[in-house]
Amino acid sequence: MTFTFDRIPVGICNCFLLRGEKTILVDAGAMGGLSSFTRTMKKLSVDPKSIDLILLTHGHWDHITCLSDIREMTGAKVAVHAQDQFMVETGEPPFPDGTTPYGRFMSWSAKKILHPHLPKIKVDIVLDDNGMSLSEYGIPGKVVYTPGHSQGHSSILLDSGDAIVGDMAMNDWYLRLTPGLPVLADDIHQVVQSWKKILPMGIKRIYPAHGMDFPVEVMQKEIENFK
């Protein structure tokens, strides 16, 4: 079975295209990112209509702003954990709290400025705490429930050791200067527990939604040193 794995920047959010027997798009990007999505799809010579599923790591605004346009373009089903289903279906996702002084300032500012009113999207596949296997899509991996950044956050663990972790980690300059734990989360202690859950699962490389990928050893040290 042939499997390919590509990063697609959509605004400030990294989306990921997983192509096996069927095609999955992980997350649907932030404002201003639709042109980047269509441009990268053309570069990869992928027809958007070949996407079967849009799998959301969670429901925050920067992961669903382009969801309506991409779903219309692709005809794909939408999947998200039950705890974040309301964010997608109301189009009014809340902004997470901060976990550091900088994160708390960012959260406070964002809650004053950002009041998203996005198109209401009906979720087709509601995930539970057991996650799901991606084998029916011919993709060697699984979805694992990893709450903390949001209560419905999920991560995608590929058999290759690549882990698409959404906002379980961050690595972009406007969030943090070095890769590590998120500066924004509903419950940072729950994030740490989610890391303790998935770190023993053969992860080799971390792919965050914000910033470039990095080796798993970074997160192992972060979790070991967390207080």
Image (cartoon, grey):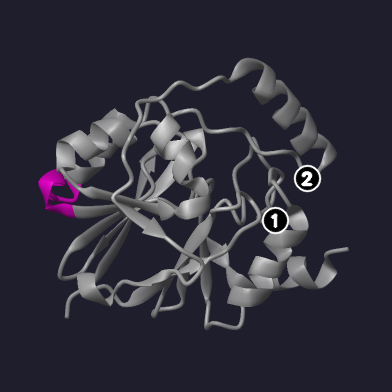
**Relative to 110, 133 lies left or right:** left
Q: Residue at x 16, y 42 (%)?
A: 74
Query: Horizontal and vertical percent for residue 124?
Result: 28, 50
Q: Nearer the viewer, residue 3 or 87?
A: 87
Residue type at the position of mark 2:
Thr
Q: Find the magenta span and give its range.
A: 43-51
Q: How many marks?
A: 2
Q: Residues within 10 Å of mark 1 (few under 14, many from 20)?
A: many
Query: Horizontal and vertical percent for residue 127?
Result: 41, 60
Tag 1's secondary structure?
A: loop
Residue type at the position of mark 1:
Leu
Is 47 contained in the magenta span?
yes
Quadrant containing the N terminus is bottom left
Sequence order check, earlier mark of 2 and 1: 2
Q: Are marks 2 and 1 in contact (CB under 8 Å)?
A: yes
**Relative to 189, 17 lies left or right:** left
Residue extending farthest to the top is 113
Q: Can residue 218 be seen from the camera position used here?
A: no
Query: Horizontal and vertical percent for residue 102?
Result: 79, 35
Quadrant containing the C terminus is bottom right
**Relative to 31, 116 lies left or right:** right
**Relative to 143, 134 lies left or right:** left
Is 181 contained in the magenta span?
no
Q: Which residue is mark 1?
A: 181
Q: Residue at x 72, y 38 (%)?
A: 97
Give the label on residue 99, or none. Answer: 2
Query: Horizontal and vertical percent for residue 79?
Result: 34, 53
Instruction: Please tell me whether residue 151 is drawn above or below residue 225 in the rendered image.
Output: above
Tag 2's secondary structure?
A: loop
Q: Nearer the viewer, mark 2 or mark 1?
A: 2
Q: Nearer the viewer, residue 111 or 172?
A: 111
Q: Residue at x 46, y 64 (%)?
A: 128
